[in-house]
Structures are given as structure tokens and as C-alpha cells.
Amino acid sequence: MARMTMIEALRSAMDVSLERDPSVIVFGEDVGYFGGVFRCTAGLQKKYGEERVFDTPINESAIVGLAVGMAAQGMKPCVEIQFADYMFPAYDQITQEAARLRHRSNEQFTCPMVVRMPTGGGIFGGQTHSQSPEALFTHVAGLKVVIPATPYDAKGLLIAAIEDPDPVIFLEPKRLYNGPFYGDHSGKSVPWSAHPAGEVPEGHYTVPLGKAAVVRAGSDVTVLTYGTMVYVTEAAVKETGRCVVVHEATRTSGFGAELIAEVQEACFWHLRAPIQRITGWDAPYPHAQEWDYFPSTARISRALNTVMED
């Protein structure tokens, strides 16, 4: 089986979808001729032409607004916002138009579109290129939100998102584009070519939306996480009624709070200790103190020790 980076896996997902379905189109800032700021769409315009893979003006609201109109008319747009930090001008189109169309029109119209956005930090991008805004989308009814952690999942989830009849926000942890990240920013990087999760089928397959994957089975503690934090957490956990939630985004009103509420409602009488939560700090993403902000293996290990001591 071929080994791919997450970038190559995402490109393969769009390639497969463009080839299988003529209603699929890809557009965004620099995604055509240049192939995207992270090269996720490299070569797709040359293969499928300028009418199906094309560049747009620097206007996120127009990109998403155009996609909403195309989707309502039966197309399947897969658009790219260069960084999730840039999506705020398009937030009205995403939350008030794309998310509402099926319900507002009594199902006369649907909105089968995907908005891809690189998310998270760990690449020295500072506060305007490192934010994790997933909670701003998970709070909106009518949207599905996806954050993959492996190249295999990235391709299968993106194909499933493109084939979904409703709008999907697809957040790509850019720290994972070229390899897993185990929390040591000064350590030797590991490429996906040397990791089992880098094995990706070349053809069509899907990974179901809305289902969690078990990365490592165990019986002492359950850790709920996603995106980049899968690997940082895996490095901290050696070995369940005990639960730790980890995410990179800021703490207050983060998606971790929703996960904790779900566990409390479903498993309260099985819990043996209070749930611990490890997150980014409630502060704008700091350029100079990036690794103090980023949830570290040391912070995750302390939370695991605390939950095991109670």
C-alpha cells in the first residue's frame, strides 16, 4: 500500500472525487495554478481544467457564498480557506446560509459543500495562523465538523464529507500535514512514510463521519481527544471509570466541555474520579510562548496521575 503524507492523502481524496463525480469542483485562494498554500491541490487544475479547479479573489465571504449558491443548484463545491484564522469574514455565510438552507427551505434545497481549513498551531505561525476554532462550528446546528489525525482518516473522511448531502467543516491540523507530532518541538521529526498510519489506499474509500476511533485500548483511564493532540496524548498514556479530555483550543466553552457533559450524562455512576481537562490557555495564541500554550506531554501526564490518584 502506498505511503502518503496528510497533504498527499487530502489531494488524493479530491482527485478521486473529481474523477468519480463531475459535479465536484474545487476552488479557493491559490488552489488552482499554485496548488494551494500547503500544496494540497497541486496538479489538480492541470488534470481537471480551470472550470473545475480554479483560483478566487482574496475574499473568504465570496468563496463560501459562491459555494452555497453552487451547492443549492446541485454542485458539490470543496473550497479551501487558507488558514482557519481567516474564516471569520465567511462565518455569516457558513452559519446563517449553508447550515440553515435545508431547514429554511423545508428540504427543497440542500447544501452539499465542504469548507477545508488548516487549523491549530505548532508551526510558529503566531496568533493569526494558529487558532483552533472548532467550537465556533460545533455549536451551530446544521454543520458537521471533522478533524482528522492520520493520512488514512484524512482521505476517507474528506471523501465522505464531499459525498455528504449537507455542509461539512473540514479542519486539517497543519502540524500533522507531514508527520505525527509527539509534543517535543525540538526533537527529531517523524515522517508519515515511517508511520503505519501513513499507509493510504490509492482508490475510493470512506471513513464514516461522527464516529470515534480507538487508538489504544486499555482499562484504567479513557482519554478523549482529536487532531494533533492524539499523538501528544498517546505519548503520555501508557495504559477506564476515569476520563481525561485533551484539546489544543482554548479552554472556556471549548469542545472539550461538551465531551465532558456527554460523559457525565452517560457514565456518571461509573466515574471513579472527576474528569480532567487539558487545553490551550484562555489567551490569544502567543507567538513567543507557543510551547507554553501548547498542551504538553508533562501537563497531560500530571492530569493522568491526578485522575488515577482520586
Image (cartoon, rainbow, N blue to C red):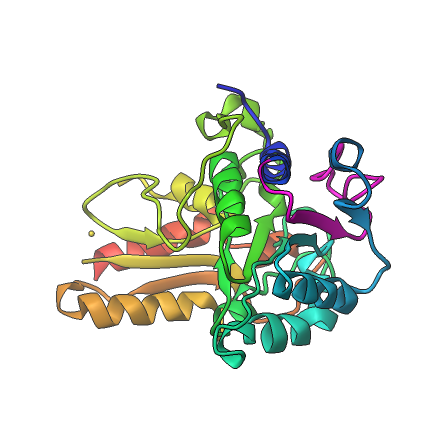
Name which residue lies at 80% across and 32% down. Answer: 46
Q: Is residue 211 left or right of residue 80?
A: left
Where residue 109 sits, quadrant-wise, is bottom right
Examine the rendered structure and indicate whether residue 168 appears above or below residue 177: below
Q: How many marks?
A: 0
Name which residue lies at 63% across and 32% down. Answer: 8
Q: Main secondary structure of the magenta part?
A: loop
Residue 235: percent from left, percent from top: 41, 39
Q: Quadrant of the C terminus?
A: bottom left
Residue 88: percent from left, percent from top: 70, 70
Return the residue nearer the eye: 281 or 105: 105
Residue 309: percent from left, percent from top: 22, 57
Name which residue lies at 49% across and 77% down. Answer: 103
In the image, the segment drawn in magenta is 20-43
Residue 185: percent from left, percent from top: 61, 40
Residue most extreme to the left? 269
Where residue 290 sits, quadrant-wise, is bottom right
Return the residue nearer the eye: 182 or 141: 141
Q: Is residue 76 left or right of residue 223?
A: right
Name which residue lies at 72% across and 39% down. Answer: 41
Residue 298 visible: yes
Q: Is residue 216 left or right of residue 26?
A: left
Return the residue nearer the eye: 281 or 75: 75
Q: Is residue 268 magenta?
A: no
Examine the rendered structure and indicate whether residue 64 appears above or below residue 141: above
Residue 124 visible: no
Examine the rendered structure and indicate whether residue 278 appears above or below residue 159: below
Q: Is residue 35 magenta?
A: yes
Residue most extreme to the top? 1
